[in-house]
Amino acid sequence: MSQQKADYADDTDIDESLDQLPDEQTLEETVESLESNGFEVVVVDSGEEALSELKSQIPAGASVMNGHSTTLEETGFDEYLTEGDHEWESLPDEIWSIDDDAERQAARRESQTAEYFLGGINAISATGELVAADRSGSRIGAYPFAAENVVIVSGVNKIVPTLEAALDRLESVAYPLENERAQEAYGVESAIAKQLIFRQELEDDRTTVVLIREHFGY
């Protein structure tokens, strides 16, 4: 069952000041900073437009993997990947059809090298850095190098002024909400066990950031 931010926000203590929609000037400055750091950036107005953009990024026949992302769920991409009418190789379908635990874990590791890996992010600094963390590393393991192409989708509510503020947002907004989700979904607490600061993309056209002008994800 899809679990979204609204399922936890009322019962979770977060720093609301780090979960606000930025003004237009801040958004423009953030886009410029991300682009100067080598990221491709697309700004859309809604979840529906985000889903359309994500579909357009991926060519027919490509192998596609997704890291867990509430934003991907909210846009409908996760459901489309596993149930939609497309011509991609859906690696999640292949992975979760494997009964043997060791074989499934090996397939999950191999999926980090997908032709297209999609996921979310926990914070974006207006100075152009992306911040994310996982308990297992199954999402951020693909971002720096392993995947051939990376597409990151985020609500603009994750934009904060500085890298320091982005790290604060990870701790005081994203983690408390993810911890609640993990306990409900898996029966275990989450952890900021493996953390990534994605400062620059040095390979042309490899990493695209799709920004939605609304509150999405956490």
Image (cartoon, rainbow, N blue to C red):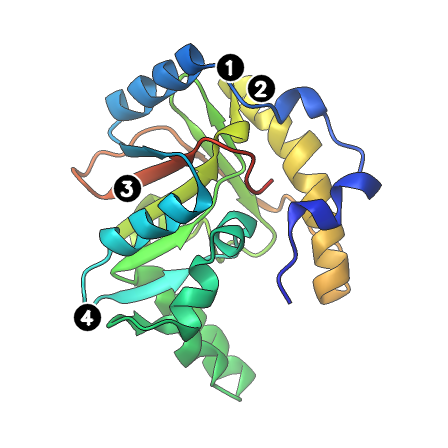
Amino acid type at mark 2: Ala
Q: Which label sits on residue 161?
A: 1
Amino acid type at mark 3: Thr
Q: Nearer the viewer, mark 3 or mark 4?
A: 4
**In the rendered image, which quarter contains the N terminus?**
bottom right
Q: Which residue is mark 4?
A: 61
Callout 3 touching callout 1 (CB < 8 Å): no
Q: Which label sits on residue 207?
A: 3
Of the two numbered discs 3 and 4 on the same chain, state the one appearing first in sequence.
Answer: 4
Residue 26 as seen in the image, left or right of residue 61: right
Amino acid type at mark 4: Gly
Q: How far apart in space, not on screen, are marks 4 and 1 (Cα)?
A: 39 Å
Callout 2 touching callout 1 (CB < 8 Å): yes
The single residue placed furthest to the top in the displayed view is 25
- Please indicate, yes or no, whether residue 180 appears anywhere in the rendered image: yes
Please rate how many residues cluster around mark 1, counting C-alpha atoms within 10 Å: few if below 14, some from 14 to 19, many from 20.
some
The residue shown at (40%, 80%) is: 94
- Please indicate, yes or no, whether residue 148 appears anywhere in the rendered image: no
Q: How far apart in space, not on screen, are marks 4 and 2 (Cα)?
A: 40 Å
Of the two numbered discs 4 and 1 on the same chain, state the one appearing first in sequence.
Answer: 4
Of the two numbered discs 4 and 2 on the same chain, state the one appearing first in sequence.
Answer: 4
Percent across and percent down for residue 36 are: 25, 20
Q: How far apart in space, not on screen, are marks 2 and 1 (Cα)?
A: 6 Å
